[in-house]
Amino acid sequence: MHATYFDFVNPAKIRADHPIGEDFLLFAKHTSRDELFAHQDRLFRKMLLRAWKTPFYQKLWGAKGIEPGDIDGLKDINKLPTYDKSDIMASIDRCPPFGDFSGLDSYPPNEQPPVKFHTTSGTTGKPQVLIFGPKSREVQNLLLARLYTLQGIGRGDVVHSVYGHGPINGGHYIRESVTHWTQAIMVSAGTGVETRSVKQVQMMADFGATAIVGFADYIKKLAKVAREAGLEPGVDIPVRTISGHMGREDKSAVSEMWGGAACYDWYGVGDTGAIAGEGPDQDGLYVMEDAQYLEICDIDTGEPVKDGQSGDMVCTCLFKDDVFPIIRFNTHDVSAVRTGKSSLGLNFTRIEGFLGRSDNMVKLRGINIFPQAIGPLMEEIDSFAGEFYCQVDRDDAGRDEMTVIAECKSNEIDKLSPKYEALLKEKLGLGMKVKLVSVGATSETTQVDVRQKPIRLVDTRF
């Protein structure tokens, strides 16, 4: 028999372990925390078997003197070391070109599943190889579709996606999620390089886009391009829902730019797929705990922190028992568990969302500054045009200083810098310089027109 991708996918079994739509709401409301842990433990034990057959984990865990019998299920997960992208890149260097983390060699040749190959965008360095097995890929697709469904996207919607394609995973992942697990119509426009911005807004008007998915920076830009083209967002383009990566972006500002559309945040990385996302209550991001085991760990010590305290997100994908097991992957993205009860009555943990990157964090006079968080703070000033970056320099005396270079819509740029500096000092408790420039002047540095995630930090110290 000629085996295909579809022979390795059992949709009914996937839905049984990871329900979607109304079935998910029932599961999340009526499953106790003890029952949820038992569900997680069952999946973890199965994945652990695959991991022990994978050279990457044999090396990682063996170096710590850990043997298979030492880990008795999910309760012992803290005995295992974390790893991060640098370990994956070392694996690729050690065993080029695909590394030794896929686990494909653990299968007999006639039982090896087909794989999907993509890469990360390379935002934090060289693009990383991503390998997905059919079963785990479809679970990832379902998890994102579950979030879209929770946010009101489904049958009758026209979804306009501005995620990139090529070898990058993003656009392909989004397309599969929408087309495989929702009944919405998908328009894969891609980035402004793939489809010019002015063409994109015309497509949105022509096809009646009701939802936009992508990164907040480019979605905001499209609203400006639409108006320049004589198209009014919310009227000529009937968008009612925007789902993407808001971080601490001012969602009310994005909503206003798009005619009052509801804006939702979700979080995930290329390796793991969707980890958490907002629901209709917009009260924190619900961790998809039936599939993702998320720890918040101290940035310096790696130890778990108390709820409400910020730290690195360390993720274990409980469903990845076919290809590329992911156990205690340190994303170096920072968040915190949101305390209190869900107004929706869901028994799933909520997090604050993406607060910044610990490896992109700047420490000035004892205060941790996340460059991505600077922009949303400046949104309070009407003249801020939305684009910026932070530059860190070290003077001859060894003192570090940060300068924020921000685009300004006003004709009185020279007079407004003190207003911006006062706002940031009030919000951050730290003085820093603000250099205001004309609209479009930061684009060469931020690369906002060609990157899904614009550059927000230029560090000249090293």
Image (cartoon, rainbow, N blue to C red):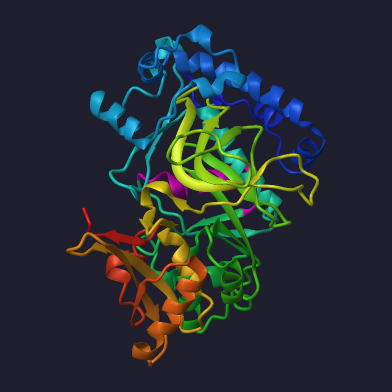
In the image, taking residue 414 as reference, residue 116 lies left or right, namely right
- The answer to whether residue 97 is seen in the rendering is no
Outermost front residue: 397
User: Is residue 175 in the magenta section?
Assistant: yes
Residues 123 and 113: in front is 123
Kindly give the residue lying farthest to the top in the view shown: 69
Q: Is residue 122 above or below residue 26?
A: below
Report the magenta stretch's main SS. Answer: helix
Q: Is residue 182 highlighted in magenta?
A: yes
Residue at the far bottom in the pictured view: 411
Residue positioned 60% across, 21% down in the render: 74
Q: How many marks?
A: 0
Q: Residue at x 44, y 17 (%)?
A: 112
* Residue toward you, 192 or 381: 381
**Residue located at (40% from left, 57% from top):** 453
Any part of residue 349 in sight: yes
Magenta-drawn segment: 167-184
Apparent side of residue 330 relative to residue 121 in the rendered image (left or right)? right
* 356 is higher (above) or lower (below) than 217: above
Residue 130: quarter of image: top left
> Between 298 and 341, which is closer to the camera in this rendering?
298
**Residue 43 percent across, percent down from the top left:** 62, 22
User: Residue 310: x and y, percent?
Assistant: 54, 47
Q: Position of residue 457 (x, y in %)?
A: 33, 60
Tell which of 75 and 273 is nearer to you: 75
- Taking the image as shown, residue 400 lies to the left or right of residue 178, namely left
Residue at point 79%, 52% (across, down) = 343
Q: Quadrant of residue 238?
A: bottom right
